[in-house]
Image (tube, rainbow, N blue to C red):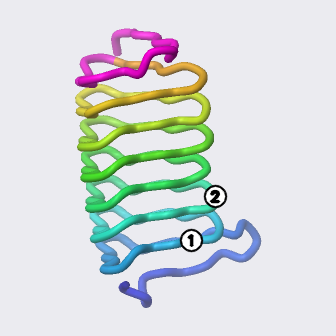
Amino acid sequence: MSENSIKYHEDSNTFIAGKKSYFEEDTNIDGNFIVGAGSNFWKDLNVKGILKLGKGTFVKGNIKADEAIIGSNSEIKGNVEVSGELRILDTVEINGSAVAGKEMLVRPGCKIKSAKASSTMELVGKVSIKEIESGTKVIVRSE
């Protein structure tokens, strides 16, 4: 892990990784986590809090968090699982499944293998989701 690029904000219990950070092992964060643009995670990313993934981030493993915002142009090779709200910004590619415990927002240009939201899934613009699990309420709207 590039230790020197992580800072901690005690008042908000937030860890901040600078842009182009890299993490070679499983990353476990007990708190909120803001990740700078162009960062790389070579294994799993687990956050007990809110995850804000910067644009152009690459995650080779799975992501688990309480809530998450996946920045545009990011690529996740594994699965994304959040217990709360999941926001997937423009042109994100998720090779596994995306599961939200509450609402899910998917922006234009995203490619997802499978998706499930316990509450509602909002699809904006042209998105590619190969499979949406039954029981998911889907809202589709143009940009």
Identity of the residue furthest to the bottom in this view? 4
The residue sitting at 57% across, 28% down in the picture is: 103
Q: Quadrant of the C terminus?
A: top left
- Say whether residue 137 is left or right of residue 18: right
Q: Which residue is mark 2?
A: 49
Q: How many marks?
A: 2
The residue sitting at 30% across, 52% down in the picture is: 78
Vertical position of residue 58 compared to residue 43: above or below: above
Give yes or no for residue 139 being in the magenta stretch. yes
- Say whether residue 74 is left or right of residue 2: left
For the residue labelled by badge 1, is the local secondary structure a helix, a strand or a loop?
Answer: strand
- Front residue of this view, candidates 46 and 53: 46
Query: Picture quarter containing residue 1?
Result: bottom left
Instruction: Please state which amino acid type lies under the numbered disc 1.
Output: Ile
- Front residue of this view, candidates 67 and 62: 62
Residue 75's spot in the image, x, y percent?
25, 50
The residue sitting at 40% across, 38% down in the picture is: 98
Q: Which residue is mark 1?
A: 29
Give yes or no for residue 63 being in the magenta stretch. no
Residue 25's spot in the image, x, y percent?
36, 79
User: Mark 1 near mark 2, Cβ–Cβ under 8 Å?
Assistant: yes
Q: CA distance from mark 1 to mark 2?
A: 8 Å
Instruction: Please state which amino acid type lies under the numbered disc 2.
Output: Gly
- Magenta span covers which residues? 125-143
The residue sitting at 39% across, 19% down in the picture is: 123
Q: Earlier in the sequence, mark 1 or mark 2?
A: 1
